[in-house]
Structures are given as structure tokens and as C-alpha cells.
């Protein structure tokens, strides 16, 4: 497919397992996945994670725990009698991780650095566990550009605050860029699972990813603001014209690092407000909670379809 990441086959082994683009790892006696509280020496990672097929990430530990219980009910996964789901990364005190059969549910915190550190370790986890062809999803929240609160947005590409389709990072004092590509076919398949009966819209478009929630997203309501409302609107209207449909804070790293690893990935977020109309998240908590279930439903449908097809 024209949309497939060009280097997926050079990045993975022929059996679909993740090949690490780092020769150092296999030379190490053991690899400690510090922020996950796991290690290749201390845990049998193949035994624990070898059957994983889907990795679902979202910002908060609570939401990912809820997602784990939802997907458990949806796919009919049973826990041993009298047990509850355990947070596998509990003692990292950083991220939370729940495993429900082939689905791994992990919280990623806020922002590119947080999701970036996690992705390094989860991609290595996939390698150590010999997971084949994993699919990664980010289920999140965002600000809509021209879409009211409660709209589901599937990203077809991620751009930074200057509309560049790359993740830039400083390595050994030099700036390097990695293409922030998402799997367009997966995005189309997800869009195809939106139910016309859903009482909200599901749209596809370009996602802007910023390093900040306030000034970085053109908000007037942070602790600091050195621009006018007219400047803000001019910027938001201009990115809207360039095809940006939403703004959030992780998609650039999520797209760039999964693409670099040859892993299929999608980002599905619900808008909490229309940024063309305001800055503050005003919807009541119960409404926000219901909205946040919406991207989850799409991902559940995708996973169920896949498991039924097996
Ligand atoms: C969406 O929501 C968070 C900020 O409120 C951030 O993690 C994001 O991408
Ligand atoms: N998350 C963001 O990053 N921005 C918003 O406006 C809402 C949620």
C-alpha cells in the first residue's frame, strides 16, 4: 500500500516481530525498563507479554484502568476467580499498565517528553517479548478547531506548532528530525467503524501537537500571555485553513516514534471544546467523562473486529 510506512519491512523481522534500531540493546546482559518497573533480566517478558497485539495509551491512569475493564467486558476476557486487574507498573510510580489478554492499556502522562520516554520502553518491551505486528492506539482529548465539544477526531497526520510534519529533538547537541507519520489505512478503517447512529460526529484530519497547553496552543488564559485575541484568532484561522482539525500534546512523538519502529499506529481524540470559540474547558465533569468514552468505543470496535476475524 502506498500509505504503508516505507521502511516497515526493513524495520521488522520477517515474522513481524519488532526489530530494534539500536545495536546496543542485544549486547546488554539485561535491559531495565525503568519507568515501567520491568526488566528483561527480572521478568520473563515473552511469557508475560508475548501474546500482546494491541497497545492502547491514554493520558491518565484512571482512564486507562477504566479502558482495561471496558475492553475486558467487550472481548469477554475473564480474570481468575476472585482477582482484579493489577497495575503491572504500579511500583514505577510513573505510568500505569494493565493487560487484558492481547490488549495492553498504558497511561502516558501529558506531553511529548512523557509519551516519548514511555514509547522507548514500550517499543523495547515489544522487542523483548517478541510481539508480532503490534498496533498502537492513543486515545485522548484535544481542543477542536471548528468542531464543538464531544466530536471524535481521528488523526491522519501530526504536525508541530509551526505546521511541520516532523518531531524535532536535540541529540548530542544537534537537532534531528523524524517524520511524524501515522498509518492512513488504519485511520480509514477506524473512520469506517464510526456508527452513523452515534449522536456525535467522527472526523479525520491533521492534528497539531504542541509543547504547551496555554501559550503553545494560543490560549489567552494562561499565567502569561503576550499576544492579543486578534493575534490568537488569526493564528487559529490560519491553521484551520491548513487543514488542522484539532490540537493536543502527544501525537507528534506518538506518530514519529511508532513510524521509526515500523509499528502501525493511530491517534483518536475527543474534542473538549471548539478553540475558535474559547479557551476554557467549561463542560461539566459528567459530560467530559461521557465524551472521553467516545474514542474508546471506536478502538473497542476495531479490536473486537480483529479478534472475531482470527
Ligand atoms: C490532551 O489533554 C492534555 C492536556 O489537557 C494533553 O495530554 C493532551 O494531549
Ligand atoms: N487537550 C489539549 O491539549 N488542548 C485542549 O484544548 C484540550 C485538551
Image (cartoon, helix red, strand yellow):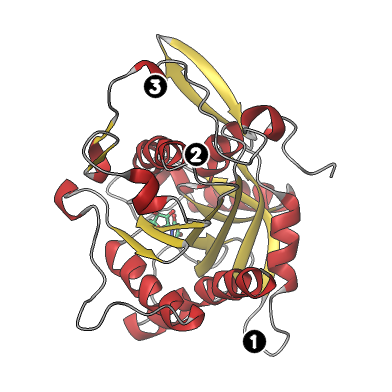
User: Residues under labels 2 and 3: Cα distance?
Assistant: 21 Å
Question: SS for tag 1?
Answer: loop
Is label 3 in contact with label 1 (beta carbons under 8 Å)? no
| Disc 1 target residue | 198
Marks 2 & 3, CB-CB < 8 Å contact: no
**Residue 25 badge:** 3
Mark 3: secondary structure: helix
Res 201 → quadrant: bottom right
Q: Give the mark, 1 or 2, whose residue is nearer the N terminus.
A: 1
Which quadrant does the C terminus fall into?
bottom right
Q: Position of residue 123 (x, y in %)?
A: 45, 39
Residue 253 circle label: 2
The label nearer to you, 2 versus 3, is 3
Residue 196 screen position, x and y as percent:
73, 85
In the figure, is residue 69 to the left or right of 13?
left
Q: Nearer the viewer, residue 6 or 217?
A: 6
Q: In the image, is 91 to the left or to the right of 128? A: left
Amino acid at each position: 500500500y502506498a500509505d504503508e510506512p516505507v521502511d516497515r519491512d526493513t524495520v521488522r523481522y520477517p515474522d513481524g516481530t519488532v526489530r530494534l534500531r539500536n545495536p546496543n540493546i542485544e549486547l546488554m546482559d539485561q535491559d531495565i525498563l525503568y519507568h515501567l518497573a520491568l526488566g528483561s533480566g527480572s521478568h520473563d517478558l515473552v511469557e508475560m507479554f508475548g501474546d500482546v497485539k494491541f497497545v492502547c495509551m491514554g493520558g491518565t491512569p484512571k482512564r486507562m484502568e477504566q479502558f482495561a475493564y471496558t475492553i475486558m467486558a467487550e472481548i469477554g476476557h475473564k480474570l481468575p476467580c476472585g482477582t482484579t486487574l493489577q497495575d503491572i507498573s504500579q511500583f514505577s510510580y510513573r505510568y500505569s499498565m494493565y493487560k487484558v489478554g492481547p490488549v495492553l492499556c498504558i497511561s502516558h502522562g501529558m506531553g511529548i517528553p512523557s509519551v516519548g520516554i514511555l514509547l522507548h520502553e514500550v517499543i523495547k518491551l515489544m522487542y523483548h517479548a517478541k510481539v508480532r505486528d503490534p498496533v498502537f492506539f492513543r486515545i485522548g482529548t484535544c481542543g477542536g478547531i471548528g468542531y464543538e465539544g464531544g466530536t471524535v477526531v481521528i488523526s491522519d497526520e501530526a504536525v508541530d506548532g509551526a505546521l511541520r510534519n516532523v518531531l524535532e529533538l536535540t541529540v548530542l547537541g544537534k537537532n534531528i528530525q523524524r517524520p511524524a507519520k501515522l498509518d492512513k489505512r488504519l485511520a480509514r478503517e477506524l473512520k469506517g467503524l464510526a456508527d452513523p447512529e452515534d449522536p456525535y460526529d467522527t472526523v479525520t484530519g491533521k492534528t497539531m501537537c504542541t509543547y504547551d497547553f496555554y501559550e503553545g496552543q494560543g490560549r489567552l488564559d494562561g499565567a502569561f500571555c503576550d499576544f492579543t485575541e486578534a493575534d490568537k484568532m488569526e493564528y487559529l484561522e490560519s491553521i484551520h485553513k491548513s487543514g488542522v482539525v484539532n490540537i493536543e500534546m502527544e501525537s507528534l512523538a506518538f506518530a514519529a516514534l511508532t513510524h521509526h519502529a515500523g509499528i502501525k499506529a493511530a491517534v483518536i481524540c475527543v474534542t473538549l471544546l471548539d478553540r475558535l470559540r474559547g479557551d476554557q474547558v467549561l463542560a461539566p465533569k459528567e459530560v467530559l467523562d461521557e465524551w472521553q468514552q467516545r474514542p474508546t468505543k471506536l478502538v473497542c470496535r476495531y479490536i473486537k473486529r480483529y479478534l472475531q476475524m482470527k
